[in-house]
Image (cartoon, rainbow, N blue to C red):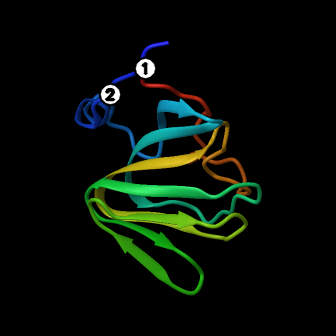
Amino acid sequence: MSAERGNLEADFASFAEHWRPKVIASLNGQEVKVVKVQGTFPWHRHDACEEMFLVHRGTFRVEYRDHTVVLGPGDYAVVPRGVEHRTAADEEAEVLIFEPKETVNTGDAETSEFTAPTGARLR
């Protein structure tokens, strides 16, 4: 088995839609996803897993009911399992997401226009 090589600039340049994560790598039951975001995502929680957000470009917020974490390029945050949150960006931001395979992006929230198909891959 040979090692895969990727390029974040090329990955992010290959799509334009917001809130539609794309898998760029899989390892140990986890997926690494790239997503472009703008606006505010619905409140939700993931009862069975944590998720990590790493900002590649722009400014991105992880909002909790009692505080907000503001992230810039190179910053990351881990949302604990079962904690209600939503994410937001006033202007377009590019973010990497690390979470278990088949995690539904809207968690426990009702299916909506924000619900992305699981497993959508760039490569």
Q: Is residue 44 left or right of residue 60?
A: right
Q: Which of the 4 image quadrants contains residue 103?
A: top right
Q: Residue 29, image x and y in percent?
A: 65, 36
Which residue is pictured at 43% across the width and 76% down the height?
A: 69
Can you tell which of label 2 and label 1 is closer to the viewer?
A: 2
On residue 54, the disc is none
Instruction: Please state the total of marks drawn on the protein image.
Output: 2
Q: Could you tell which of marks 2 and 1 lies nearer the N-terminus?
A: 2
Q: Looking at the picture, which amino acid does disc 2 mark?
A: Gly
| Residue 40 in the image: above or below residue 29 | below
Q: Is residue 9 left or right of residue 3?
A: left
Q: Looking at the picture, which amino acid does disc 1 mark?
A: Arg
Residue at disc 1, secondary structure: loop
Which residue is pictured at 50% across the width and 12% down the height?
A: 1
Residue in front for this viewpoint, 93 or 81: 81
The residue carrying mark 1 is: 123
State yes or no: discs 2 and 1 in contact (Cβ < 8 Å).
Answer: yes
Q: Residue 27, image x and y in percent?
A: 56, 33
Q: Residue 20, image x and y in percent?
A: 48, 40
Which residue is pictured at 29% across the width and 64% down the height?
A: 59
Q: Which of the 4 image quadrants contains residue 57?
A: bottom left
Question: Seen from this angle, which residue lies furthest bottom?
Answer: 66
Residue at disc 2, secondary structure: loop
Question: Seen from this angle, which residue lies furthest top?
Answer: 1
Which residue is pictured at 66% across the width and 70% down the height?
A: 84
The residue carrying mark 2 is: 6
